[in-house]
Image: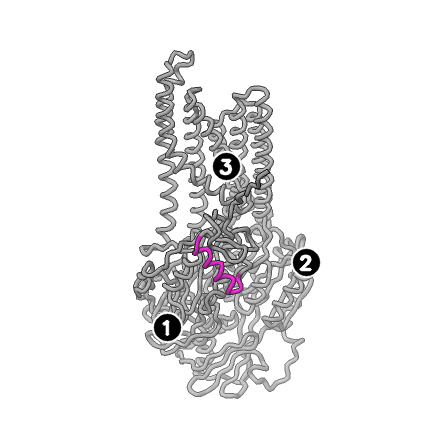
């Protein structure tokens, strides 16, 4: 026998495309083009070869073209200014839409860009939005070179210069509307051309007319197949390519089977086909997709513009200070920003000096020194004394939200019900495909003419869209309801996590107690009016609850400039006024020379030192929030409670009376002590919910499973927290926790409704009593039913709980 050489298909190791020959290779690895080879070499040279181990053939096919002037427009300073989210003396940040992001390998590579170029500080991917945020040193790497680097590895960003973010969103929505319009037009005309076939049930229509209208319908169905329906085919393809069975797989199978059946009948003159059902199916599916997209867009709109919190700032007008929401700020307004407060809008510095911490934007913690007339970007945090700024442009609430969502404050290892829904949908889809194949096989034996109808009906009627919608819709509705009640979460899945909490940790000062209401008296050497003004001027620069109380209590018309202001967490604040050092804080910090028996202290004390001499202290008796004892009584039934405080034990007796079942009362807790305590609880298996005032509790808030900052003014908050609660709503915490538990129950009931619907639908489909078109109509109805139930049930639950 002569030997026969078998030609084996050669696959590109980078992108998975077929290679024309073996001419482009590195060892035993072959490439379809030099572009893919270049990326392969680049990644391996920079120790990023693991990219190919995460997913099989994960790359994007890269053009061989060298980018000479393709991105030359990015050398224009005005264009760069429009694209950058942030730019300082050396560091810039840009957020880019990268449509090629499709798998875990893409995320891994794009989040390791710093290994490809030393000037890239960090990069973070928003997978669902297909966005990557990159922080880089523009002195070493220009924006143009950065974009060229991304393009060279197959991730060329989608760049629109005019109203970049909005334009990208609207384009996506308009594209879907065009697809619906095409499908609707073709569906209507095919229905019209099919009327002779409908009306000639006795077979009186001649075969010539049947063939003529059949081919007309075939022509009209082509744009539906190759334009309107491609969104499903592409989604199913990319899912299967990554070995993922998503919900578009059964939809694509149903569409393909129905079209092939119709094509066969028309081309073989065995009938007029079912192009009316095919185009109607696509039309109704796209309407369902539009409904889903509009639902998600609505959630995103609430998230971007309605915000989670009415951020406020001190506005200076005619020398009168007024707290206003940042959304009311206009260009030219004068604002005051105190120590550790965020700057809400791009502004010009009017003070002589400022020290700005841009860690929220770049991740770099070192403050940057600014001087008079310098531009300061939104998101920076003032470190030091109070500064005066002039707003340069209206506040963009969406940008503040973007800072909030920065990866520095995103928790990892989240186990959510959303993942459970995804896993359930996968098994559900496999079961449906199996049922469709089995039912088609049975009907081939009983009545072959109905086999395709039964198979497609099963695939369409059992689409898991409703299952996938129930979780985000319920959690999103719950998030909006809680937001209306002044509990603002940055992510809707925090509502889900809230239902799993086992241990609640409360900070005392500013959380359990009211920030403004206190009884204050001074004990010690008498202070002159000028010295009182010194103290008032100093505490005005701090956002600590005790500083705020003292500032509101002291009466003085004089305001002194502060030099060398410093705030030491857990100790106090200090500064130089008219060459005299002023200290306000703990006894040791102010060098108190008196004997202090802490066991007999029944109130908080703020000590004062002027010019190196200890004067005395302000006695501040706390006023606890209304209905706190009733709240504690309800929480004790389901949760373990701990109380932490940086203050002394003066309130221990009162706290024991309010929280008789509390597990622990810990005082003299530094910020690090609080964080360590939360971590210890988590090591014991507890799911911790932490309430703090957002300053000294920042570390503990970030460490907790859920951290909520309680505030009165909505200005001095920490972005390490997952949510913000208005102090006036503190007594409603038990209702909010109950509401979150009921929201999870609503999701589970939604699952059951969807399963019951599919059981009924599958029964009709398997018996051959359900046409594909009717199934396509019922599928979005099932989604509407589940979504409607989720929204109505969530709102009814809120009304029942009176929130």
Which residue occupies the foreground of this view, 293 or 515?
293
Question: Is residue 266 part of the magenta span, yes or no?
Answer: no
Residue 794 percent across, percent down from the top left: 53, 43
Q: Quadrant of residue 195?
A: top left
Q: Secondary structure at mark 2?
A: loop
Q: Secondary structure at mark 3?
A: helix
* Any part of residue 791 in sight: yes
The region drawn magenta spans 33-48
Between the C-alphas of marks 1 and 3, the distance is 53 Å
Q: Nearer the viewer, mark 1 or mark 3?
A: 3
Residue under label 1: 388
Residue 273: image x %, image y %?
Answer: 43, 23
Q: Position of residue 139 (x, y in %)?
A: 39, 72
Question: Which of the two labelled residues, at mark 2 and mark 1, occupies the earlier sequence position?
Answer: 1
For label 1, the crowd category at 10 Å Cα-Cα, with few meaning under 14, some 14 to 19 and many 20 or more, is many
Q: Is residue 630 left or right of residue 256?
A: right
Residue at the spot 44% in from the left edge and 69% down from the top edge: 119
Q: Nearer the viewer, residue 796 or 94?
A: 94
Is residue 35 on the magenta stretch? yes
- Label 2 sits on residue: 685
Instruction: Say left or right for 662 vs 479.
Output: right
User: In x, y percent, where is residue 3?
Assistant: 57, 41
* Label 3 CA crowd tier, 10 Å (few <14, some 14–19, many 20+): many
> In the drawing, what numbered circle is on residue 783?
3
Label 2 to label 3: alpha-carbon separation: 37 Å
Instruction: Determine if residue 488 is in view.
Output: no
The rendered magenta stretch, by its main secondary structure, is classed as helix
Residue positioned 47% across, 49% down in the render: 21
Contact (Cβ within 8 Å) of mark 2 with mark 1? no
Q: Residues within 10 Å of mark 2 (few under 14, many from 20)?
A: few
Q: Nearer the viewer, mark 2 or mark 1?
A: 2
């Amino acid at each position: 026998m002569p030997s026969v050489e078998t030609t084996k298909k050669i696959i590109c190791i980078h992108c998975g495309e077929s290679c024309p020959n073996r001419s482009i290779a590195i060892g035993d690895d072959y490439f379809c083009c030099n572009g893919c080879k270049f990326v392969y070499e680049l990644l391996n040279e920079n120790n990023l070869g693991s990219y190919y181990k995460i997913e099989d053939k994960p790359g994007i096919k890269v053009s061989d073209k060298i980018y000479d002037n393709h991105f030359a427009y990015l050398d224009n300073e005005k264009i760069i200014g429009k694209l950058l989210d942030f730019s300082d003396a050396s560091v810039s940040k840009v957020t880019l839409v990268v449509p090629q992001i499709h798998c875990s390998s893409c995320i891994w590579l794009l989040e390791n860009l710093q290994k490809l170029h030393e000037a890239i500080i960090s990069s973070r991917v928003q997978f669902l939005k297909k966005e990557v945020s990159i922080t880089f040193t523009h002195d070493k790497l220009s924006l143009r070179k950065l974009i060229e680097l991304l393009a060279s590895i197959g991730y060329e960003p989608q760049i629109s210069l005019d109203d970049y973010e909005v334009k990208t969103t609207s384009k996506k929505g308009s594209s879907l509307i065009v697809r619906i319009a095409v499908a609707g037009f073709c569906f209507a005309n095919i229905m019209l051309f099919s009327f002779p076939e409908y009306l000639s049930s006795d077979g009186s229509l001649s075969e010539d007319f049947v063939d003529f209208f059949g081919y007309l319908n075939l022509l009209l169905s082509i744009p539906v197949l190759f334009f309107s329906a491609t969104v499903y085919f592409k989604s199913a393809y990319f899912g299967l390519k990554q070995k993922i069975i998503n919900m578009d797989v059964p939809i694509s199978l149903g569409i393909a089977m129905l079209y092939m059946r119709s094509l066969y009948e028309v081309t073989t003159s065995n009938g007029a086909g079912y192009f009316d059902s095919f185009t109607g199916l696509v039309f109704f599916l796209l309407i369902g997709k539009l409904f889903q997209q509009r639902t998600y867009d609505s959630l995103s709109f609430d998230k971007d513009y309605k915000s989670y919190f009415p951020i406020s700032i001190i506005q200076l007008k005619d020398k009168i200070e007024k707290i206003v929401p940042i959304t009311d700020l206009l260009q030219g307004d004068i604002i005051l920003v105190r120590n550790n407060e965020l700057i809400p809008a791009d502004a010009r510095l009017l003070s002589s000096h400022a020290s700005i911490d841009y860690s929220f934007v770049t991740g770099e913690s070192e403050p940057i020194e600014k001087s008079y007339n310098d531009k300061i970007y939104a998101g920076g945090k003032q470190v030091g004394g109070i500064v005066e700024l002039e707003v340069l442009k209206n506040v963009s609430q969406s940008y503040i939200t973007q800072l909030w969502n920065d990866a520095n404050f995103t928790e990892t290892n989240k186990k959510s019900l959303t993942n459970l829904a995804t896993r359930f949908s996968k098994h559900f889809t496999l079961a449906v495909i199996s049922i469709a194949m089995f039912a088609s096989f049975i009907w081939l034996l009983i009545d072959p003419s109905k086999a395709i109808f039964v198979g497609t009906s099963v695939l369409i009627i059992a689409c898991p869209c409703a299952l996938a919608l129930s979780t985000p819709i319920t959690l999103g509705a719950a998030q909006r309801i809680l937001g209306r009640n002044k509990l603002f979460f940055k992510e809707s899945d925090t509502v889900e996590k809230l239902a799993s909490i086992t241990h609640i940790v409360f900070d005392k000062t500013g959380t359990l107690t009211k920030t403004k209401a206190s009884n204050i008296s001074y004990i010690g050497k008498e202070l002159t009016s000028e010295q009182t003004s010194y103290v008032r001027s100093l505490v005005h620069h701090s956002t600590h609850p005790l500083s705020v109380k003292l500032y509101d209590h002291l009466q003085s018309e004089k305001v002194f400039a502060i030099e060398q202001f410093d705030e030491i967490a857990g100790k106090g604040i200090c500064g130089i006024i008219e060459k005299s050092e002023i200290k306000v804080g703990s006894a040791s910090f102010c060098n108190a020379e008196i004997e202090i028996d802490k066991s007999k202290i029944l109130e908080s004390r703020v000590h004062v030192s002027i010019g190196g001499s200890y004067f005395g202290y302000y006695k501040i008796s706390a006023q606890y929030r209304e209905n706190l004892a009733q709240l504690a009584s309800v929480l004790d039934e389901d949760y373990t409670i701990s109380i932490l405080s940086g203050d002394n034990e003066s309130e221990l007796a009162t706290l024991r009376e309010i929280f008789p079942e509390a597990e622990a009362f810990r005082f003299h807790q530094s910020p690090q002590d609080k964080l360590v305590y939360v971590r210890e609880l988590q090591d014991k298996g507890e799911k911790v919910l932490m309430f703090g005032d957002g300053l000294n509790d920042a570390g503990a808030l970030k460490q907790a499973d859920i951290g909520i900052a309680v505030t009165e003014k909505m200005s001095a908050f920490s972005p390490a927290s997952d949510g913000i609660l208005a102090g006036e709503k503190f007594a409603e915490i038990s209702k909010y926790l109950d509401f979150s538990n009921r929201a999870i129950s609503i999701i589970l009931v939604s699952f059951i409704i969807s399963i019951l619907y599919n059981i009924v639908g599958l029964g009709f489909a398997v018996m051959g009593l359900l046409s594909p078109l009717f199934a396509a109509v019922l599928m979005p109805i099932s989604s509407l039913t589940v979504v409607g139930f989720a929204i109505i049930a969530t709102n009814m639950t809120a009304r029942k709980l009176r929130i």
